[in-house]
Image (tube, coloured by chain):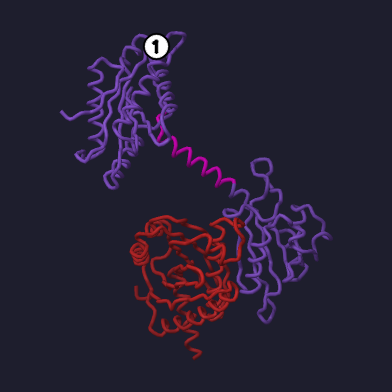
Chain colours: A red, B purple
Amino acid sequence: MSSQTITEDQRDCLQEVINVAMGQASDKLARFLETFVHLEVPNIELVSTKEVTDMLAVKYEQDAVSLVSQGFSGAEGLRGEALLIYSKINADEIADLLGYTEDEATHTEQLTDISSLLTTTFLEGLAEQLETALSYSAPRVMMLQEHGIAKMLEEKTFNWEYALKVNISYLVTDHSFNCDMLLLFPGTAVEVLKQVLDEILEDF
Amino acid sequence: MTEQLHGIILDQINAGVLVINSDMEIDYWNRFLQIHSGRGNDDVVGKSLFDVFPELPKPSLRRKLQGVFLLGTPTFSSWEQRHHLFEMPHSRPITTASQHMAQNCSFLPLKDEMGTVTQVCIIIEDATDVCFYQGELNTTMSKLEKSSRTDGLTQISNRRYWEERLSIEFSRVVRHGGHLSLIMFDLDKFKSINDVYGHQAGDHVLVETAKQLTDALRTTDLAGRYGGEEFGIVLPDTSLDQAMVVAERIRTRIADKEFTFEEQVLPVTISLGVTQFDLSQKNHEKMIAQADSALYKAKEGGRNRSVKFEVE
């Protein structure tokens, strides 16, 4: 699929845009959560469905994970889903991080709240860089401390043969908490993204 | 569109719209909320959100709203995690059992030209229908799951499910060690009960035996109808001697119980074969075969007795 490749320039541009968005996001999150949030420099790849599920199967082979998905959409068909993957999370840690008092919110509610914060803060920064605006759907808990994430994704994901995989690790100091974020764009949205990146490149 | 038109749409829309400022005071609410919350305009606009709606989970919602103001990002509350935020009756009071409207709420930042969030718009959608059908679906699924593993006549586990569980327990002791015992038993001279008293009497005996069994067993034991008049009991973490005690308890319970059908007393006793896991057994079928062979000895020995399997 020749159309489903991104050029070196587009890749660099996206990397830069994401770096800036991540910087902004960790700064904002740190202020809100009153702790240091470290976002690891992601690696960007255009991958097939199969590659994503294979990668997840290897990485989370032994672990029960929780998976939260949040859809986003912008103008001209830029849309996708952000998947947040948590393994070995401690419910108390999240409540503490969010500043919720004990028993105030259920574990799944805390999980969706923290996911929404992490996802939207980053994506807002990204949208700003791409000079667009995004709308979001409510986050959905797709797995709760379950095994077999790869199989679940194979069964539940449709509509994207190729996707742009942006792996982002959130690490929060003071709290033993970290998770992986995976941004998935369906093929048509990758085309849109490439156009937007080209426009940015032209401005340089 | 004119502002007037916006106002009309906001008042017609089938969702609640509420706008609050950074002091958590209500700047605007639409007609949907007026109707459903049963409050008057003067009691709401300009008042504190948490005073007007005291049912809101104040600390966590305040924190969520702070996030929207500070980060400029939306946040959400779904009925799946929290049934509702705003306590309101719903639009299907007759056909659904729940009292309050299930809600999906979105909290959207409203920014000024400088990009500063000055207000938050809360959109409240009625998710009662979805919530109701999801509940129905869950109930149906669990009923289906139960019926797929239950024997229709006796209401204990059917053979397929019972054997599946035995095989799981078998794999467990192979991997982790420990005890596992198995009892197989059947009703003595069941054919003649059917012949003399009729098949309905036979069915009654099977149902009553299963009931006695359920009452006599510990929660960790699993009884199943293996076929015809034969039953099996999986006893995890149980040695052969302990299993023999259980077997005898069941045997005497059945023997002492008076089975009656249409005012006739039926002669009901059972014969039991007992075995335990050991490393020479290749699979769970081998355990069944051993218990069956002990059961055969019990029949040969005169019935109404428990026999443990011994290697010859």
For residue B133, say whether it is visible.
yes
> Disc 1 on helix, strand or loop?
strand
| Residue bounds of the magenta highlight | B132-153
B234 lies above or below B172: above
Residue drawn 54% across the image and 64% down it: A94
The total number of labels drawn is: 1
- The 10 Å Cα crowd at callout 1, few under 14, some 14 to 19, many 20 or more, is some
For the stretch drawn in magenta, the main secondary structure is helix
Question: Pointer 1: what residue?
Answer: B266
Q: Chain of mark 1?
A: B
In the image, is residue B134 part of the stretch drawn in magenta?
yes
Q: Would you identify the image quadrant in which residue B46 lies?
A: bottom right
Q: Amino acid at mark 1?
A: Leu
Quadrant in the picture for the N terminus of chain A: bottom left
Q: Could you say where residue B199 lies in the image, as x and y percent from the top left?
A: 38, 15
Q: Quadrant of residue A146?
A: bottom left
| Residue B178, percent from left and from top | 30, 42
Near-viewer residue (B34 or A73): B34
| Closest to the observer, A187 or B243 | B243
Is A184 on the left or on the right of B228, as rendered?
right
Visible in this render: residue A184?
Answer: no
Q: Is residue B158 left or right of residue B125?
A: left
Q: Position of residue B182 (x, y in %)?
A: 30, 32
Query: Looking at the picture, does residue B111 appear above or below residue B213?
Result: below
- The residue depicted at 32 percent of the width and 42 percent of the height is B168
